Image (cartoon, grey):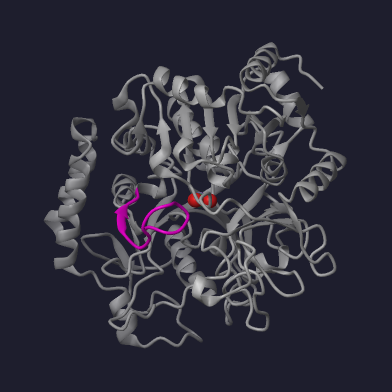
Amino acid sequence: MTTTNQSLQTWVDSVARMTQPDQIHWCTGSDQENRQLIDLMLGTGDLIELNQDTHPNCYLHRSSPSDVARVEHLTFVCTSDKEDAGPNNHWMAPADAHAKVDALFEGAMKGRTMYVIPYCMGPIESPLSRCGVEITDSPYVVANMRLMTRMGAPALARIEREGTFVKGLHSIGELDPEKRYIMHFPEELTIKSIGSGYGGNALLGKKCHALRIASHQARSEGWLAEHMLILGLESPEGETHYVAAAFPSACGKTNLAMLIPPEGYEGWKVYTVGDDICWMRRGEDGRLWAINPEAGFFGVAPGTGPNTNPTALAMLDRDAIFTNVAVTADNQPWWEGKSDDETPAKDWQGRDYDPANGPSAHPNSRFTVSIKRCPSYSDQAEAPQGVPISAIIFGGRRESLVPLVFEAKDWEHGVLVGASMASETTAAATGKVGIVRRDSMAMKPFCGYNYADYFAHWLSFGEQAEGLPKIFHVNWFRKDDDGKFMWPGFGDNLRVLEWIIDRCKGSVDATETAIGYLPTDNGINRDGLEIDQAEMDALLKVDQKGYAAEMDSIGDYLDGFGDRMPAAMHEQLEKVRSEL
Ligand code: OXD
Ligand code: MN
């Protein structure tokens, strides 16, 4: 296969000249092609067959132990003007960045096959969707892209129709952490990634295209590309509201997107539209309409269990690729939290399991599976116009200070609330875990331009207030003095979502405080929940002194962006400060 799109053909030819693969394969996305790739990888050991009786069509990939997470310190946004990338990104001048990685790409595919993957982010027929082409020498990347995107012939047909696409070049190179770079050139709609096979670094449709490049594009075109799940919540009366929620990596977006209502919530239904990325555009009615650009889940395995996310477990018993999980003696995939009645026999590195070596599955081990396998998959997820968003929720992992839930006073205040998000770091990126850092809108690792300009872009939506979603902040992760989580989380988070939807409908009162509106004493439904009043009070208390210090720290953070920070952000901050 080749293409009628001249610029695509020219690019593929030039990449082949530089990387010198043995052969070039244009991916069609067919079942037969997938089977051949799986067989190839079983032969090379890139994939290991799992128990086909219990897990048909499931395979395990063990990565290089030095290649298990995103590498933020090696991820660059290469704009012509450094200020456009902002203090929130690592920057390199485009010419230097091209020269640096091109030297590594030189001959990098010798002895390998070069795969050309046309893909579409979002439903093929949606005007909100965008296409890209990833060139890679990794069959594992091809197999994952097939689950995570609409890949192959229909995407190529759209590219040939539209003429535009994002160029993504990837090679596993030598898998050498010293020669690993994830470079973004938003002005050229181009990505170059070398030296890693890990999802966030190598499946270029996901973080690189659908967040970093797309956020940059969204700014100039007037839409939003966000690190958010999208779920639909249907009440027993049959009314459905959609919410988009931003949480940092590995903070439970997948669990929330597939939530099972707790006891007492019979008749409520949760529909999953997406678990990681949300593209939103203002509709003619003034509302924000959202699509999930992805077609699959690349979810964190550890902690996915019968009590935390039975929906996810149910979709993982066939047609899934597992990366860096452990296996049981009968070769089933296993990870910490999966079940109590199985035990690991081999750890994620293939060693006999020994607790002295740490957890059996890597803390950032993953599953890749098509969203169509999800039992709660929304019948609106493929709708070309997307779903209308009633509420936007921000949330971080904060063991103290931040209440269970509060509502921003208006859109501008909501932008400050999102910008003020902070969270403890997790294993989704290399580096120390558990350090609280600012992670505005959960986009710290993913915003493809200067955060100050990004906040200005968010603020610009407020100019036409009609129809905009309300903005909320939640924190499921508060701990008591003994270090125990105070809120049960998981299914019980529906109690908080119910309050949020009621606030959107205007059917429930709230208490006004300096930081926003909080539930009244009985605002959150606690029927059937074992939590005492004192604990609930603590979860919903605004610690004035603590917040005064938090506001000082947010002020310092905003100051770090200098004059580019919109004045409205400082004004919103001062308003909260004075009310405290
Ligand atoms: C992810 C991440 O993989 O945020 O979704 O790291
Ligand atoms: Mn994510």
Position of 303 with respect to 249 (left or right) is right
- Can you see residue 223? no
Q: Residue at x 56, y 25 (%)?
A: 105
Asked which quadrant contains residue 118, the reply is top right
Q: Nearer the viewer, residue 224 or 136?
A: 136
Quadrant, the N terminus: top right
In the image, residue 438 sits, relative to residue 75, either above or below, namely below
- For residue 47, above or below residue 496: above
Furthest toward the left, the residue is: 578
**Is 94 located above or below residue 544 in the figure?**
above
> Where is residue 546 drawn, in percent x and y?
18, 66
Q: Horizontal and vertical percent for residue 545? A: 14, 67
State which region is magenta: 425-439
How far across and down, in percent of the image, does residue 234 sit? 61, 63
Task: Please tell me which residue is depicted at 60% across the width and 37% down the height of the picture.
Answer: 172
In the picture, measured across the screen, residue 415 lies left or right of residue 21, that is left
* Majority secondary structure of magenta residues: loop
Which quarter shows the C terminus? bottom left
- On whether residue 426 falls in the magenta region, the answer is yes
Total number of numbered labels? 0
Q: Is residue 458 above or below residue 3?
A: below
Tell me where residue 90 sits by quadrant. top left
The furthest residue to the right: 32
Give the residue displayed 45% in from the left and 19% down from the top. 99
Q: Is residue 382 magenta?
A: no
Relative placement, left or right, of 30 versus 268 is right
Q: Nearer the viewer, residue 26 or 411?
A: 26
